[in-house]
Amino acid sequence: MKPVKIIPCLDIKDGRVVKGIKFVDLKDARDPVEAAISYSRAGADELVFLDIAASVEKRATRLEWVKKVAEVVTIPFTVGGGISTLEDMERLFGLGVDKISINTAAVKNPQLIKDASRKFGREKVVVAIDGRGNAEGKGLPHFEVLINGGNESTGIDITEWAKRVEALGAGEILLTSKDRDGTKQGYDIEMTRAVSEAVSIPVVASGGAGTLEHLYDAVTKAKASAVLCASVFHFGEIKIKEAKEYLKGKGIPVIGDKAR
């Protein structure tokens, strides 16, 4: 097993880090620049920055917000939200971003995945997938892809979409359960495992972390390559170092502790 990555996520709205439950009821959490410095020093393996209102507001990523974080972050840095063209990606890479994450734009224009992979390299292209579970009898997939900030149904089966994005050239999948987001009840193990088993590229589990055991379950039961957390890190309920020590104690390889 490769070392598991521990990844804090900055959901950005109006220039601030926010956190809600199931993508709504957003509350202010912290300043993004302060958060980037803190997580870099704490030993996080990567940082994800999502301009969560960009697609809904039909605009590009706010570059001024990204630039401020890029100037202080010292770990690999992924940006998503409002990225819909190769030019958008070029501008972000020019600011020092390591990877870009596309979601709604990828569903609407799958060719964008292939074009980005060819131009920038597979390792720089993350496809974010927001998913939810559906009850039987609704005529929808058991696990369905959502777009536009989780507000729009697509009718697309999540595992089929995961396999397609891998074939198109995605280097990584960032999988978020809308049902579990912000609930602290644990990741959606069934959905995450289904996607992890359907592809060979890394899958980052997102949505629902509340305890150290949840991180362990995401890796061992859901077969995730990395765990992404927001609330528990932002509000100090779990420390990066604590998460790494817990997983290591359970026999899960982690990247060397860099906390200082």
Image (cartoon, rainbow, N blue to C red):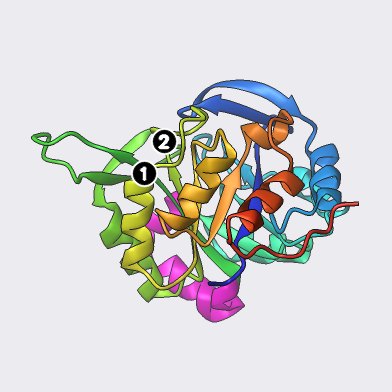
* Residue 100 in view here: yes
Label whose residue precedes the other's in the sequence (1 or 2): 1
Q: Name the residue carrying label 2.
A: 178
Say what secondary structure mark 1 lies in.
Answer: strand
Front residue of 139/38: it is 38
Amino acid type, callout 2: Lys
Residue 196, position as x, y percentages in the image: 38, 62
Most extreme residue toward the right is 260
Front residue of 232/163: it is 232
Give the spatial CA distance, label 1 vs label 2. Answer: 6 Å
Start-end of magenta stretch: 103-123
Most extreme residue toward the left is 137
Residue at x-position 78% and y-position 38%: 32
Q: Name the residue carrying label 1.
A: 131
Q: Is residue 232 left or right of residue 215?
A: right
Amino acid type, callout 1: Gly
Residue at x-position 58% and y-position 61%: 252
Residue 175, position as x, y percentages in the image: 45, 51
Report if residue 247 lies within the magenta region. Answer: no
Task: Give the image quarter of residue 111.
Answer: bottom left
Say what secondary structure mark 2 lies in.
Answer: loop
Q: Residues within 10 Å of mark 2 (few under 14, many from 20)?
A: many
Q: Are marks 1 and 2 in contact (CB under 8 Å)?
A: yes
From the image, give the main secondary structure of the stretch colored magenta. Answer: helix
Q: Is residue 135 left or right of residue 253?
A: left
Q: Is residue 170 above or below residue 75?
A: below
* Residue 108 in view here: no
